[in-house]
C-alpha cells in the first residue's frame, strides 16, 4: 500500500505545483486534445514516453502493449489508430521499440498457448521472416536485432493499414517513423524508416510486405 499512498501524495503535490506555477494551464487543455504524436510503445515500465521525450501534457496519444506490436487484427490497435488519424488528425506516428525487450526475448525462446505467447507469435513471424540473418548472430545481438526488425515490421503494419492509406489518399499529413530506445544511455535512435506517403512506402517496402 505504501506505493499507492506515495502515488496519491505525489499527485496532490503535482496538482498544487502546476496550478501555482502555471495558473489556467490545466483549464486551457481541458476542453480538447490536439496531440502531435501517436506513440506505439512497449508496456515495459522503463519506457514510458512522458519521461523519454519531455513533451508537454497533451502532446502524445499513447498506445502500449507487450513488445510494441501493431496487430492488424487487434480491435484495440485499430480503434486507437482510427481515432488518432480520423478524429484527432495526429500528424506523426512513432513506433518505439527497446533493446532488452522481455517480449522480444520471449519470442526467441519458447512457444506456448497462454495469452502472452499467442500475442508474441506476431513477433515470431518477424523472426521467421529474417531467420537467416538472425541465426548468424549470437544470443543478445539476435534479440536486439529482432527488436529493431520488429519495430520496422510494425511500421509496415501501420503503413499498409486502410486507415493510413485513406488518410494519405485524401492528402492528410501522416508521418510514420520507427525508433528504438536503449535504457543504458536513455537515448532514442531512429531506425532509418520514415514514411510520409503511400508512394514512399510502396517504393521502399510495399512489394515485400504485400500479400
Ligand atoms: Co518490451
Image (cartoon, rainbow, N blue to C red):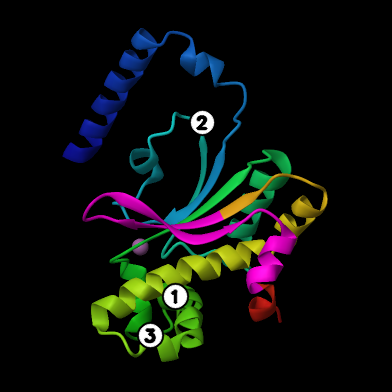
* Residue 119 placement, left or right of 18: right
Identify which residue is drawn at 63% across, 73% down: 205
Image quadrant holding the N terminus, namely: top left
- Closer to us: 114 or 29: 29
Per the model, the C-alpha gap separating discs 3 and 2 is 39 Å
Q: In the rendered structure, are the residues bearing label 1 and label 3 in contact, judged by CB atoms less than 8 Å apart? A: no
| Neighbour tally class for label 1: few under 14, some 14-19, many 20 plus, Cα within 10 Å | many
Which is more foreground, mark 2 or mark 1?
2
Q: Residue 58 carries which label?
A: 2
Q: Residue 177 carries which label?
A: none
Q: What stretch is highlighted in magenta?
A: 177-205
The crowding category of the residue bearing disc 2, from other C-alpha atoms within 10 Å (few below 14, some 14 to 19, many at least 20), is some
Q: Is mark 2 within 8 Å of ligand 1?
A: no
Q: Residue 134 carries which label?
A: 3
Left-right relation of 40 to 158? left
- Dot 1 or dot 3, earlier in sequence: 1
Q: Is mark 1 on a helix, strand or loop?
A: helix
Q: Position of residue 43 (x, y in %)?
A: 39, 56
Q: Is residue 177 visible?
A: yes
Q: Residue at x 31, y 15 (%)?
A: 17
Mark 3 beta carbon near ligand 1 (under 8 Å): no
First in sequence: mark 3 or mark 2?
A: 2
Amino acid at each position: 500500500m505504501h506505493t499507492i499512498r506515495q502515488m496519491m501524495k505525489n499527485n496532490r503535490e503535482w496538482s498544487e505545483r502546476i496550478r501555482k506555477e502555471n495558473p489556467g494551464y490545466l483549464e486551457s487543455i481541458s476542453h480538447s486534445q490536439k496531440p502531435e504524436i501517436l506513440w506505439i510503445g512497449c508496456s515495459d515500465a522503463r519506457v514510458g514516453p512522458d519521461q523519454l521525450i519531455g513533451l508537454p501534457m497533451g502532446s502524445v496519444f499513447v498506445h502500449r502493449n507487450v513488445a510494441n506490436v501493431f496487430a492488424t487484427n487487434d480491435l484495440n490497435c485499430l480503434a486507437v489508430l482510427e481515432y488518432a488519424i480520423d478524429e484527432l488528425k495526429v500528424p506523426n506516428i512513432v513506433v518505439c521499440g527497446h533493446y532488452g525487450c522481455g517480449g522480444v526475448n520471449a519470442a526467441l525462446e519458447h512457444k506456448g498457448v497462454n495469452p502472452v505467447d499467442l500475442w508474441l507469435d506476431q513477433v515470431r513471424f518477424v523472426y521467421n521472416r529474417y531467420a537467416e540473418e538472425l541465426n548468424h548472430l549470437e544470443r543478445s545481438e539476435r534479440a536486439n536485432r529482432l527488436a529493431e526488425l520488429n519495430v520496422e515490421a510494425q511500421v509496415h503494419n501501420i503503413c499498409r493499414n486502410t486507415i493510413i492509406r485513406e488518410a494519405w489518399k485524401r492528402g492528410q499529413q501522416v508521418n510514420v517513423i520507427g525508433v528504438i530506445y536503449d535504457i543504458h544511455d536513455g537515448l532514442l535512435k531512429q531506425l532509418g524508416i520514415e514514411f510520409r506517403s503511400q508512394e514512399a512506402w510502396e517504393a521502399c517496402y510495399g512489394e515485400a510486405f504485400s500479400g
